[in-house]
Image (cartoon, rainbow, N blue to C red):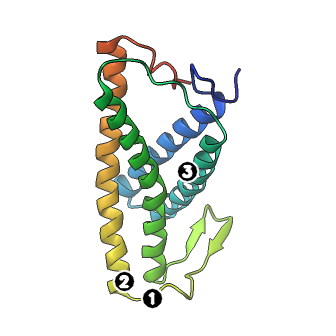
């Protein structure tokens, strides 16, 4: 098992970050939309923030697999922009959620292990919280669109281009 990335494929650590964050985001949707369970939604969201930061740091110290050669340079740039926007959403989604909760005077209880009380530097009023609620919603829909685009791109590589781009990230 290779832990670090190589120029040909992603290593185990990158794959672990990728699939753990995917499962966490999927679980969040399940908890908030089906059960309206904010305890789990917020706990998992805070975990996604931490994992996202660690993944970005990990990426800075690893090579990325070399993009597949091809005449479609626009696809390379589209993929790069999509990945960067996905990382931005992975960070901004939980940040806006945490600020929204704190502006509405709701602490963040992380899995019942640790509680983060509303910070004194965050204005505690519904209007301020409303701005972050709107941002959280917009980022959420953006994330859903970007994830869909990401999945479609991976499937295109696998079924149409018949290359190993998808296989490089599978567990």
* Residue that carries the numbered disc 3 in the rendered image: 52
SS of the residue at dot 2?
A: helix
Q: Position of residue 93 (x, y in %)?
A: 43, 60
> How much space separates mark 3 and mark 1, taking CA atoms?
27 Å
Q: Position of residue 32 (x, y in %)?
A: 39, 57
Question: Label 1: few (<14), some or many (≥20) within 10 Å?
Answer: some
Query: In this picture, is 152 found above or below 35?
Result: above
| Residues at circles 2 and 3 in contact by the CB criterion of under 8 Å | no
Label located before the other in sequence (3 or 1): 3
Query: In this picture, is 81 found above or below 111?
Result: above
Q: Position of residue 75 (x, y in %)?
A: 31, 29
Which numbered disc, 3 or 1, marks the residue closer to the eye? Answer: 3
Point 32% across, 76% down: residue: 131
Point 47% across, 61% down: residue: 94
| Residues at circles 3 and 1 in contact by the CB criterion of under 8 Å | no
Label located before the other in sequence (2 or 3): 3
78 and 166: which is toward the camera? 78
Residue 71 lies left or right of residue 121; in this view the side is left
| Residues at circles 2 and 1 in contact by the CB criterion of under 8 Å | yes
Point 51% across, 64% down: residue: 39
* Residue that carries the numbered disc 1 in the rendered image: 124
Question: Label 2: few (<14), some or many (≥20) within 10 Å?
Answer: some
Query: Which quadrant does the C terminus fall into?
Result: top right
SS of the residue at dot 3?
A: helix
* Residue that carries the numbered disc 2 in the rendered image: 128
Query: In this picture, is 115 found above or below 74?
Result: below
170 and 153: which is toward the camera? 153
Point 48% across, 84% down: residue: 105
> How much space separates mark 2 and mark 3, taking CA atoms?
25 Å
> How much space separates mark 2 and mark 1, taking CA atoms?
7 Å
């Amino acid at each position: 098992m290779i832990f670090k990335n190589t120029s040909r494929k992603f290593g185990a650590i990158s794959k672990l970050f990728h699939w753990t964050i995917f499962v966490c985001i999927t679980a969040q949707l399940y908890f908030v939309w089906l059960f309206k369970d904010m305890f789990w939604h917020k706990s998992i969201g805070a975990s996604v923030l931490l994992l996202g930061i660690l993944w970005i740091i990990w990426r800075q110290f690893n090579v990325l697999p070399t993009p597949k050669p091809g005449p479609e340079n626009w696809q390379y740039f589209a993929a790069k922009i999509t990945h960067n926007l996905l990382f931005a959403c992975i960070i901004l989604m939980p940040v806006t959620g945490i600020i929204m909760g704190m502006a509405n005077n709701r602490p963040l209880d992380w899995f019942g292990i640790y509680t983060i009380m509303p910070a004194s530097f965050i204005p505690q009023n519904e209007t301020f919280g409303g701005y972050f609620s709107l941002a959280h919603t917009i980022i959420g829909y953006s994330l859903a669109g970007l994830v869909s685009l990401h999945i479609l791109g991976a499937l295109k590589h696998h079924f149409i281009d018949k290359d190993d781009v998808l296989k490089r990230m599978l567990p």
